[in-house]
Amino acid sequence: MMRRIRTIYSVLFWVATVHLAIAQNANNKAVVIRTANTSLVYKVDNDQVIRQCYYGKAINENDVAGIQLTSLDAYPAYGKAYVNEPAFRAVHADGNLTTELAYVSAETQVQDKNITLTRIRLRDRHYNLSVTLCFKAYQQQDIIEQWTEVVHEEKKDITLFNFTSSQLALRASSYWLTSFYGNWASEMNMKEEQLTEGIKTIDSKLGVRTNQFAHACFLLGVEGPAEENSGTVIGGTLAWPGSWSMEFEVDPLKNLHILAGINPYASHYVLKPKEIFKTPALLYTISHEGKGGITRKFHTWSRTYGIHKGDQPRMTLLNNWEATYFDFDEKVLKQIIGDAAGMGFDLFLLDDGWFGNKYPRNDDRAGLGDWDVNKKKLPNGLDSLLREADRKKIKFGIWVEPEMINPKSELYEKHPDWAITAPNRAIDVSRNQLILDLSNPQVQDYVYNVMDNLLTRNPGIAYLKWDCNRYVTNPGSSYLPADRQSHLWIKYTEGLFAVLKRMRQKYTDVRIMLCSGGGGRIDYGTLPYFDEYWISDNTDALDRIFIQWGTTHFFPAMGLASHVSVVPNHITQRSTPLKFRFDVAMSAKLGMDLQPKDMSPDEKEFSRKAIQEYKAIRHIVQFGDLYRLLSPYEHKRAAMMYVLPDRQEALVFSYLLKKEIYGNDQVLYLHGLEPTKTYTLKEVNKSPQYSRISSLEGQKFTGAFLMTYGVRFQMYNEFESVVFRAVAE
Ligand code: GLA
């Protein structure tokens, strides 16, 4: 009992001291990171420790003085009295385990009309080690991109054990975390939970294809669960395809600390004097219009900064993966090319199976690494296919998986040492393959040259699907020295970026799809090199509604490839109507993954029209602001809409997920329209059999009416869908 009282007293004493210290320092130096509508305020206390004091709606410059100091370290290091999870932990050259960072200086540069860069320099009180907190603030989009740079001039190497990109901290009565989790064919599921005292970690230790089980994105409802259209929500995502971690620690005083960055697990980093260690960036924003506000800010930002050529429309395509798998030859492909062109697709995408001769790629057991055209399947090379595509006036794309190697390949016979594997252990294959060690510059050159040769020899290739089908197990690099093996996780990703950068310098116009056995790799570190992404191998339209719902919280529909495939679906065995499959795919970037010769004439005709209609509305999907109307997690009807920034046009999607015997009459309250404008409603991709909105067809309503009274119509059958456009006069 006595002991307990003593503990309580000492806690009270500590809390009191902290508050006293804070009260004494009300007018300290402030560093403010601003965007058009938000402010992030730091203050330096009398002991030169920098504290995060505010993140929220914009604060007037004259009012910053009124912001009080807090006890929340901007970037807490392990040492002194810090006992929560540290942002930074290093072992110094002399073995000292602790670091004490003090504020040195801060400067803000205006980079252009939209971007400011603030650098806050901290330095250890004793050692020659500096840590710089860097913030790019995107004014119009309210996005902050934060990373950290570490450099030292100690006498010998130091070892970094924790090195987060950022540490956001806040104080509220409750915190509600939405995380995104899944697995192959079931990506981007959303789960919300209230955070309690302690640490909730979401992370990936997979090294490559690190989103297989979880995505490096979070939404945080402040003071209550995150609402769609109201309330304060913080959203963040890490721009890094390597192992990552996000920790949400609620401390005993109920502060929340959000630590995000490279996963430090088995990844300590030996830093030489003068070498700069730069973490990836956490991108985040705060919305006072709920989750919807977060989404729209990220989408707008990504179209300028986050995704390659985000200002250009995306092509429709037909992919032969589910049509043929590995089983094709020139004749089959020419037939598909002809059919794809006939239906009106912009591009034909040749998938896996076109390469390897000594070890032909006839299934997933052989050939990865040997990127020469398989002479048996394609005796006239790619050239003949490219010419055929040209004749049919359709563009041509091709699948590659250049980071990977099958042990059954000529490349492996020559360079077994290029594969990632631990020494003195049996190799551990997954999908019969290993990963090439991109920490090795020779391997980087090899991968670059594979792509360079393919594209220079075949200048007609307009599109690549860059796949990546396994994650790292049994880690080991024969290139990295014994005492740098733990660098593999970081050096691999840096090597990948080096290759992608080199490729993009030479090939800016080739469209590239980011794929990783579905959505195993999707992040804003990688997407600036890619035009689009394949979020799931699961093409079942019902499952896709959920997968795309989660994904589009952070990543825009313009890049989200969504394909109509056959029924029963190859993965789920579910059958859904063709219109439903199209309506789901049309809410993102429309494509198709089936053998067109197996379609009936009616199906082909329906598809031809749907593709034509998509081409007429794709600018709204690809460049519009997304508003979610009815969540499939909460309702039997799911609905969403896109509105062009000038509010002239909107496109609404409504899906019934389950049969409702007496009809489903949930109202669609539209969003984002101009209240005073008059909009005409027009159904898109009509079913030849029925229309649920025939009475509304051609009707005119004001934006105000559509947003307050809403659009009302019944839906009945499972997998029914309605798409309509609202066009202002
Ligand atoms: C991965 C991709 C698929 C397909 C196959 C080919 O699984 O996600 O779309 O390209 O590889 O092997």
Image (cartoon, grey):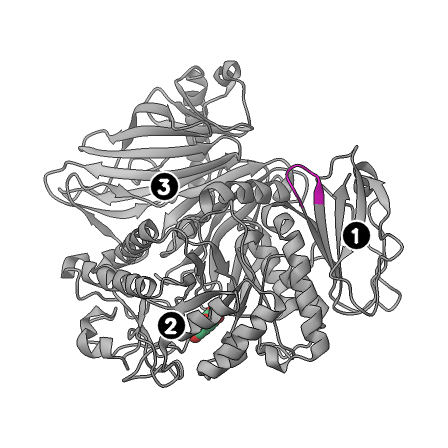
Mark found first going from the N terminus, 1 or 3: 3
The span picked out in magenta is 643-649
Q: Nearer the viewer, mark 2 or mark 1?
A: 2
Residue 427 colored in magenta in the image: no
**Amino acid type of the residue tagged 3 in the rendering:** Val
Snapshot quadrant of residue 153: top left
Residue lying furthest left? 155
- The amino acid pointed to by label 2 is Asp
Q: Is residue 632 above or below residue 157?
A: below
Question: Disc number at residue 383?
Answer: 2
* Residue type at tag 1: Lys
Mark 3 crowdedness (10 Å alpha carbons): few <14, some 14-19, many ≥20:
few
Gap between marks 2 and 3 measured at Cα: 64 Å
Vertical comparison of 598 with 543: above or below: below
Residue placed under numbered mark 1 in the picture: 682
Query: Which mark is on residue 103?
Result: none
Q: Residues within 10 Å of mark 2 (few under 14, many from 20)?
A: some
Residue 224 x %, y %: 64, 42
Whether residue 644 appears in magenta in the rendering, the answer is yes
Identify the secondary structure beneath mark 3: loop
Say which of 376 and 567 sits in front: 376
Which residue is denoted by mark 3 in the rendering? Answer: 83
Earlier-in-chain disc, 2 versus 3: 3
Question: Marks 1 and 3: which is nearer the front?
Answer: 1
Q: Residue at x 41, y 56 (%)?
A: 510
Q: Nearer the viewer, residue 84 or 529?
A: 529
In the rendered image, residue 565, in percent from the top left (x then y), is placed at 60, 73
Residue 219 in the figure: left or right of residue 429: right
Which image quarter is the C terminus in?
A: top right
